[in-house]
Image (cartoon, grey):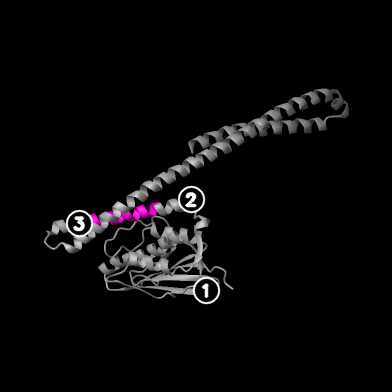
């Protein structure tokens, strides 16, 4: 970025004398035209010579500007390629970290639930390992999602199909987390035979996972999360409704922002980076839909919904 900025400064240094020279030339021509005819005739050859020199100088200056412009575009393209290579490398590294981190989380969870003859301090240590690995796993997923967003969704991966199976897989991924808080996830209001919509599978999976995870985090134990689908004109709307802590009007205004901290905290001390809902918004909009958030207030639950375009509706 510094390289490009330096070249832009050099380009600007040439622009300023160019426009200054153009202004001076225009002033000379105007002054010459205001002179009496006899004086104009006596100065004519001098003006011709000045005009020729001015034209040559102007041509050279324009040529240099064009050369620097071409060089700048070339260096900008090289910078973009380098930037893409760095992002790809970082994405691959982070992707490789996801599996071992998920393994650490699952092992700590199994040990915490199955080991009975351990001291309270050892159990607290296992809980810390589980929470820390969960937090790191969330951040790894957010980094991967952001990397994919920066590259843009590949139009070749966009499909027209039934998103029902993507939803079911997302629910399965969060089954254990829901059981731990005795939360029921009800998706009976989602039609198994949905009309085909336009979506990218990994992006939609991330949307469902973030919304379900968010609902679990901000719900009290022994409550229910309801997932439903509705057809609205040329769209299908999916909604995820919880019976959790709800949101204030101020929360609703900023809920889809990055690193947003709401007035409520996760009910089970789960980690929260404040990035999940911003990822949801970006992915949904990249797939051509919209996101919405609704709550009647504190302790009255929240509903998050999004739309996807119906493909080839007749």
Q: Which residue is mark 3?
A: 126
Residue 54 pos. (x, y %): 73, 27
**CB under 8 Å between callouts 2 and 3?**
no
Mark closest to the chain's N terminus, 1 or 3: 3
Question: Magenta residues?
Answer: 128-143
Q: Which residue is mark 1?
A: 232
Please rate how many residues cluster around mark 2, counting C-alpha atoms within 10 Å: few if below 14, some from 14 to 19, many from 20: few
Residue 311 shown in magenta? no
Q: Nearer the viewer, mark 1 or mark 2?
A: 2
Residue 167 visible at all = yes
Name above or below for residue 104 compared with residue 220. Answer: above
**What secondary structure do most residues of the magenta stretch adopt?**
helix
Observer-nearest residue: 189 or 245?
A: 189
Disc marking residue 151: 2
Disc marking residue 164: none
Residue 285 pos. (x, y %): 50, 60
- Label 1, label 3: how many angstroms apart (C-alpha)? 47 Å
Secondary structure beneath disc 3? helix
**Image-quadrant location for residue 134:** bottom left
Q: Residue at x 87, y 25 (%)?
A: 41
Observer-nearest residue: 99 or 124?
A: 99
Secondary structure beneath disc 1? strand
Secondary structure beneath disc 2? helix
State left or right for residue 237 relative to residue 120: right
Please rate how many residues cluster around mark 1, counting C-alpha atoms within 10 Å: few if below 14, some from 14 to 19, many from 20: few
- Label 1, label 2: how many angstroms apart (C-alpha)? 31 Å
């Amino acid at each position: 970025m510094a390289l490009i900025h330096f070249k832009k400064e050099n380009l600007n240094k040439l622009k300023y004398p160019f426009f200054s020279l153009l202004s001076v030339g225009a002033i000379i021509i105007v002054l010459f035209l205001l002179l009496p005819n006899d004086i104009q005739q006596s100065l004519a050859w001098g003006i011709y010579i000045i005009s020729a020199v001015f034209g040559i100088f102007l041509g050279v200056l324009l040529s240099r500007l064009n050369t620097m412009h071409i060089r700048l575009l070339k260096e900008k393209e090289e910078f973009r390629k380098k930037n893409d290579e760095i992002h790809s490398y970082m994405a691959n590294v982070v992707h490789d970290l996801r599996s071992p981190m998920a393994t650490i989380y699952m092992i700590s969870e199994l040990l915490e639930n199955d080991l009975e003859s351990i001291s309270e301090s050892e159990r607290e240590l296992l809980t810390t390992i589980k929470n820390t690995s969960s937090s790191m796993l969330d951040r790894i997923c957010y980094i991967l999602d952001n990397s994919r967003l920066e590259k843009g969704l590949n139009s070749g991966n966009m499909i027209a199909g039934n998103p029902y199976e993507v939803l079911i897989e997302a629910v399965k991924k969060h089954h254990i987390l829901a059981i731990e808080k005795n939360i029921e996830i009800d998706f009976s209001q989602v039609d198994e035979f949905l009309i085909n919509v336009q979506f990218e599978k990994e992006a939609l999976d991330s949307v469902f996972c973030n919304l379900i995870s968010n609902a679990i985090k901000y719900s009290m134990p022994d409550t229910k999360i309801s997932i439903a689908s509705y057809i609205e004109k040329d769209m299908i709307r999916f909604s995820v409704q919880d019976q959790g802590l709800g949101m204030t009007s101020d929360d609703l205004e900023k809920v889809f922002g990055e690193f947003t901290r709401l007035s409520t905290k996760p009910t089970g001390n789960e980690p929260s980076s404040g990035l999940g809902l911003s990822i949801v918004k970006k992915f949904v909009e990249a797939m051509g839909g919209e996101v919405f958030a609704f709550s009647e207030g504190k302790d009255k639950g929240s509903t998050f919904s999004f739309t996807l375009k119906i493909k080839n509706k007749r």
